[in-house]
Amino acid sequence: MKSLASLAVVLLFAFAACSSTSSAGTAGPTDAVQGTDASSLGDAQTDATSPADTAATDATTAVDVVDTVETPDIAASDIEFPDMQWDELPDPDATVDIDYTKPVGQLYAQTSNTLYRLDVAANAFTLVAKFTFNKNSGSVTDIALDMSGKLYAITNHDIFTCVTASAACTWLAALPGTGTFNGMTFVPKGTISPVTETLIGIGTDGSWNQIDVLGASATVKKLGEYGGGWLSSGDAFSVEGIGTYATLKGVSKTDSLAKIDPTTGKIISIVGETGVDQLFGLAWWNGVFYGVSNDGNIYTLDTMTGKATIVAGITVPKGVKWWGAGVSTRANGGI
């Protein structure tokens, strides 16, 4: 190896010497064109041999240097590799164990223009923000959350998705027709569609309507209605493992709580009269039925009788007029 390296260096410097001699020979005419006199040119040609001599001398020195370099002898057994713990590496084919039993999302309530979140630990409604819209702003008649906790909002003419942390809403589609939806909820996957949740818009007339957003437009398909002269007071919820419930009006003196068939909207049973009017928001959270009313109060509803009891322990912002409430279809966890 050392002999080959020495020969390579000698050849390299020999080539450099030839190149230097050639370059020195062509330098004269260039200097002449730039105004160099003939005597100076002769001197330059005489000096042209000096670089070659210098290169030869440098080549000899380089060979001596190369000869003094010793390549260490390294055996394969001397190379140390890191101690890899192969049994600790993740299995690429392994499935991730996700706990689907935990509740999804939180309980939200809204006025016509502002979103609030129920802070259960603090027993208070926390202000999120006023709703903002990228287009077609309007009064929010109700909200709903899907199985992932994504929030949807509805106005008299349009449907939006909104950021739960900021209440910033993005327009999805215009609602067809002139009917007004004062309630909205998702029903769980497998209820109407075997592969996805279904968004339901509840008309003031008690109609139960499937809403499908396709591109920048929405289609509305009536699935049924409450029937029996009952109208929508303003809201419904559908939670896996709990059921589908709504607040109704039109027959009783005050709003009533009813259990609903989520596929048609037909009343399964009237739980009972609440004793409160304008329960525009209805939701379930942590084993409790909550109703919020246009008078600004929050109530718990008895699941056996429907009777509403005002909740004194939860701080409610002054002056609010509740227009709706919403929870995820997986507020009870499990899937």
Image (cartoon, grey):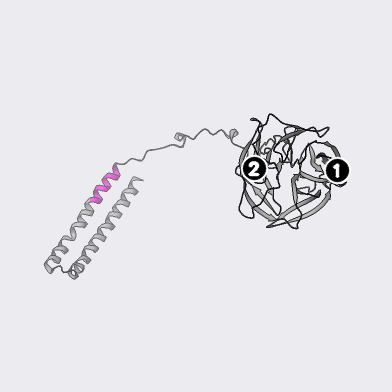
Q: Main secondary structure of the magenta part?
A: helix
Q: Nearer the viewer, residue 139 or 75?
A: 139
For label 2, the residue is: 115
Q: For the point 67% across and 43% down, which residue is it?
A: 111
Q: In this orientation, does residue 145 appear? A: no
Q: Nearer the viewer, residue 160 or 79?
A: 160
Q: Earlier in the sequence, mark 2 or mark 1?
A: 2
Q: Are marks 2 and 1 in contact (CB under 8 Å)?
A: no
Q: Which residue is mark 1?
A: 251
Question: Does dot 2 land on a helix, a strand or a loop?
Answer: strand
The image quadrant of residue 118 is top right
Q: Position of residue 99 (x, y in %)?
A: 69, 35
Q: Bounds of the magenta span?
A: 58-69
Q: Position of residue 273 (x, y in %)?
A: 83, 37
* Label disc, if present, on residue 229 of the rendered structure: none
- Magenta span has 67? yes
> Is 325 above or below relative to 17?
above
Q: Relative to 263, is 80 above or below?
A: above
Left or right: 22 as drawn, with respect to 254: left
Q: Separation of disc 2 and disc 1 at Cα?
A: 31 Å
Q: Which amino acid type corresponds to the residue marked 1 in the rendered image?
A: Val
